[in-house]
Amino acid sequence: MRYILLSLTILFFVVPTQAQQPTNVQAMDTPNDAGKSITVTWKRSNLPPSAIYKVAISESQSGPFLPIADIKPTENLMSKDAATFGHGAETSQTHFLKVSEYTDPNDAEKKIAIETDKTYYVQVTTQLPSGQTFPSDILPIQAFENLFNNTKTNNFILGTVFSIIILIAIYMARRREMYIRRIAGLEAIDEALGRATEMGKSVLFVHGLTGMGHVSTIASVNILSQIARRTAEFNTELKVANRDPVVMAVSQEVVKESYLNAGRPDAYNDDMVFLAATEQFSYAAALDGMMVREKPAANIMMGYFYAESLLLAETGASTGAIQIAGTDSYTQLPFFITTCDYTLMGEELYAASAYLAREPKLLGSLKGMDIGKAFLLFALLFGTLFATLGNQTLTHIFTAY
Amino acid sequence: MKDFLLNIDRRIIFVFVALGVIIPSLTAFKLPIKPTPYVQAIYNTVEEVAKNKGTILISFDYGPGSDAEIQPMALAILRQCFRKGVKVVGMCHWPDAVGLAERAFAEMAAEFSAKSGVDYTFLGYKTGAGTLVLGMGQDFQGAFSQDTQGNNTADLPITRNIRSLTDFDYVIALAAGNTPEQAWIPFGQERYKFKFGVGCTAVMAPDQYPYLQSGQMNGLIGGLAGAAEYETLVNKPGKATGGMGAQSTVHLIIILFIILGNAMYFLYGRQKGGAQ
Amino acid sequence: MLFLRRTLPLALAFILGITGIFVFYVPHSTSQLIETELALWDRIIWAFAMLLGIYSLLKLHLGRVRKQQAGWGYSFLVFFGFFLMFIFSVYNSGNGPFVPRSNAPEDPFNWMFQYVQVPADATMFSILAFFIASAAYRTFRARTPEAAILLVAAIIVMLGRVPIGAVISDFFPMASTWLMDVPNLAAKRGILLGVSLGAIATALRIIFGIERAYLGGGE
């Protein structure tokens, strides 16, 4: 009889308790970060919608346990954070919670941050709508610092592969001559400079709005170097307008060096490269004024532009100057195309210095870009095909996290 | 006459555009405004934040040139936040945005009796753009140790629990330049995975679409039209809504000129090789 | 001299370039510290460069006034605006330069910003509307079938983006959204992929010292 009673007790109390208790509870350091965060995971179970999982934390195994969050049975599934947990089938069956802070028990307004290398204790408790609670085991955990961000593995591999392709292409370029298609906008630079020389007027080089940290600015500085060399050779006046003081300082050095290399250091002075204004529309107004008053024979606009692109190009067009623009700001491309004589589009801007210098190593990098582009085209083609057929593998490989 | 119609002097077009702006602006020309899904998404996110009385960060990255387009967005968002009890932290990547942001905060705070330091705070301008965002992600209170009034962010009730950008429930960049795609996304959203929305000038809006579809941005308010949609959502028509008549008229004028140009081109231009 | 002008900048470009890549993949606090430090240096360098910029601006306009070049009267305005705003900024509603800046609307600096700079900048921006109209008229000609498609798409988007489009027909906002979301985005992604590869190639050329034109001369 006693045995039967015991069995019934187990059946009525222990079994339901086990069924409702969070299962497979695990605590771990949150991956891919600089510590200061832990992650708790537990298996999803069939609970009524109004039940909740209460996650609590303590600095001591014996408590007191402080609440961190209340999670609904349909919330916080691993599948919502593919970057950390991937795309496996189990991710839709497991809950997770990343913890980086908890409320100070003495001040509800204050949060206490999780410390690296300190042991914390976590517990997940199921609370049924009736108010019954079923706590899990208490688990110790420490946050620590990670050395590699695994979510960026695909980025790292693809970046490395592209870099290797480009470096191999540069290496190969030393051995054989490379073909580069004609870029009309760059061919026209000599024409524009020649016209300015004939007319005895200046050439205005306009930088975009971005600073030295942007590739488009670096590309435009590279082009400026080639243009300055030619204006030095042709003895044509060059004016370089800047919006960023750092770009101005770099441009002064570049132009000075180009004049030196062309054997005309005497023709250079620092005022050729000037700061027109640091604000967008003040910059546009200053340059529009220069274009109208001084009527340069050629306006060369290179870099990343914004709304001022049309203000500059339309004013330049009204003065009758030859205009060559180059930008990777695709929103502004239509404005340049409609108002300039020649426009370098997108990566043509980056190719420009290689094209103008005809340096084999620089041309090699263009070849590398083309190979990379072909690779991406195939990836796009097959990715689209597989995704249409319901296979997301390739899509996941290329997803940025 | 043919040549005149084929190549209308741009000053004549300017006159029509000017009239297209002035006449509707002077008359009570009202049009129904339907919010688009991307504008609605930002509004809905702020509503979600309001449920938990959360905190949002608004970055004022525009200058006086885009005041007409972006300031109405700022006012409408602040109106929604202060009305619903959402706390707002403001900052700038553009130095000339400081005055505009201060004006927006002052106007809305007065209307809703919002308290500086508790309901909102303004941190002002710092250089760096991308590197500043990076710094804010790593140590928010280190990147902005004080607000514009000299209060320590570590002590202010609104910012004392903000240690990183991840602690904001939503980040909105109101931008006339490249800060969303050059600073906020690569150095902020991409690394710290916060919810991010953008309000920008109409000319910049097409730039943002790739980020909308990739999910790096969850909503977009584009130009004056977007601002008018937001004003409609917060149920308080303002300058943007008032500008819709003028904008619609100017769009129609441009379309009519394009049609006229093409009609003339097909009638006369093609024989001559087309107008250039 | 060659060391300072060539070797050191190239070595710095290499070391900092590799460091930039390194910190992107390594979340460790040391890596973050390096990143924060570099970010700080960048901001400090920019602030100093700003002084250089102000010097360049004033020197340029001083030269114009001296030589009485075309429009030299405007150069006076540069000095006037610069020094006036500088004085107002230091004055700071009578509080001086060492306390947080006043945000009172009646502060002269704020007043100048609000009632001079804002309208002046807004005027510049508004010119865009006129220029867009004239550029659109001149260039939007259906010379080829492709141009005709672009023309129709442009008209749909222009109508779809303003309330009058919805008044005419619900088709315009719907079609406009589709055009922006699908064909526009597809074209932009194409350009973006090329631009990104170009950016990688340019970055590599600089990190490995293959591209040296930014140092001047290219040799």
Image: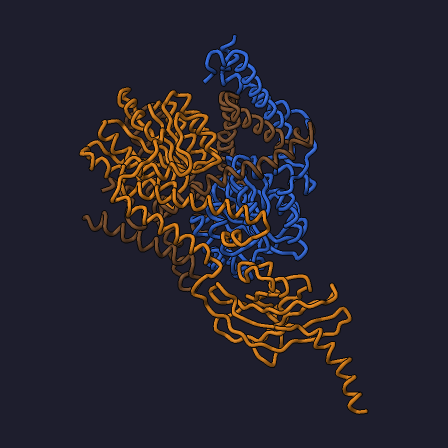
Chain colours: A orange, B blue, C brown
Q: Quadrant of residue A185?
A: top left
Residue B17: x percent and y percent? 56, 22
- The residue depicted at 31 percent of the width and 31 percent of the height is A239
Q: How many marks?
A: 0
Viewer-side residue, A162 vs A81: A162
Quick check: can you spot residue C83? Answer: no
Residue C69: x percent and y percent? 31, 24
Residue A331: x percent and y percent? 49, 35
Viewer-side residue, A241 vs A45: A45
Q: Residue furthest top?
A: B1
Position above or below: A372 against C15: above
Viewer-side residue, A391 vs B192: A391
Compared across the picture, whether A349 is left or right of B43 comes to left
Residue A27: x percent and y percent? 56, 72
- The residue depicted at 50 percent of the width and 22 percent of the height is C144
Compared across the picture, whether A343 is left or right of C209 comes to right
